[in-house]
Image (cartoon, grey):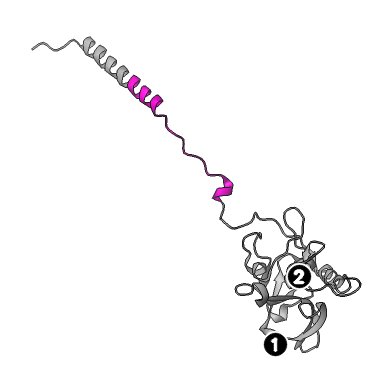
Amino acid sequence: MRYPDRRVITVVLGGLLAAVTMTGSALADAHPRVPRPMMSAALAATPGRAEAAPMVPTKRSVAIARARTWLTAWHGGPVPYSQSRYLNGWRTDCSGYISMAWNLQNANGAPLNYNTDSMLRGGPGFPGPVVHPIGWGDLKPGDAIGFLGAGSAGDAGHVMLFEGWADPAHTAYRVYEQAGDGGTHHRTHPVSYNHYKPYRYDRILEG
């Protein structure tokens, strides 16, 4: 039996391969492959979280001094309480007042008014929480006392700036407070007051 010439087989196979390649190229031109879009960094980020911006460190003495200014900042008297009004960019409720005392700012350096929930838990529009719980024995001037976190939104929560202990036994404390019964106050509460808890600003500095 005579076998086909190998040169003929090579030529035939080469022609078939060229035809297949041309057909595939034509099909690719007719139906171009759509590249998969790259997910942008913004879309890949966790929804509902603001871009992280470092909070400004504030000395304890500066926080107390800033809080004290509102005792006379409204025509020589206390700043009236409001959840919808602002003074120099700071909301005139309890959490806006503490935000002012700690000088909380957004990425552009503008006042950032936290509320009692977001101070402890962060949330949409905020770069994360700014306080953490501490013990009563750890309290120092410039720390906070109040009801923060889950369930504290609106009228349910409250926060005050701790100035110091009112007695050697630590049964009562002095605070600067923005409240609905007259605006800015400097007053004393017992430790049992409303079952509030102590907190510390994450970027507080000694001095």
- Dot label at residue 98: 2
Residue 68 position by quadrant: bottom right
Residue extending farthest right: 76
Q: Secondary structure at mark 1?
A: loop
Query: On the image, numbered disc 1 is attached to which residue?
Result: 192
Instruction: Looking at the picture, tell me which residue is in the foreground, 77 or 173.
Output: 77
Q: Is residue 9 magenta?
A: no
Q: Is residue 28 magenta?
A: yes
Residues at marks 1 and 2 touching, judged by CB atoms closer than 8 Å: no
Task: Please give the range of residues in magenta.
Answer: 21-44
Q: Is residue 156 left or right of residue 40?
A: right
Q: Residue at x 26, y 12 (%)?
A: 11
Q: Nearer the viewer, mark 1 or mark 2?
A: 2
x then y, percent, for residue 119? 67, 68
x then y, percent, for residue 204? 76, 67
Looking at the rendered image, the quarter that the N terminus falls into is top left
Q: Is residue 183 above or below residue 9?
A: below
Q: Residue at x 33, y 21 (%)?
A: 23
Q: How many marks?
A: 2
Q: Residue at x 73, y 60 (%)?
A: 55
CA neighbours of label 1 inside 10 A, class few (<14), some (14 to 19), many (20+): few
Looking at the rendered image, the quarter that the C terminus falls into is bottom right
What is the three-letter code of the residue carrying label 1?
Ser
Q: Secondary structure at mark 2?
A: helix
Instruction: Looking at the picture, tell me which residue is in the foreground, 74 or 142.
Output: 74
Q: Is residue 62 above or below residue 179?
A: above
Residue 171 position by quadrant: bottom right
Q: Is residue 46 above or below residue 151?
A: above
* Disc 1 from disc 2: Cα separation: 21 Å
Residue 170 seen in the figure: no
What is the three-letter code of the residue carrying label 2?
Ile
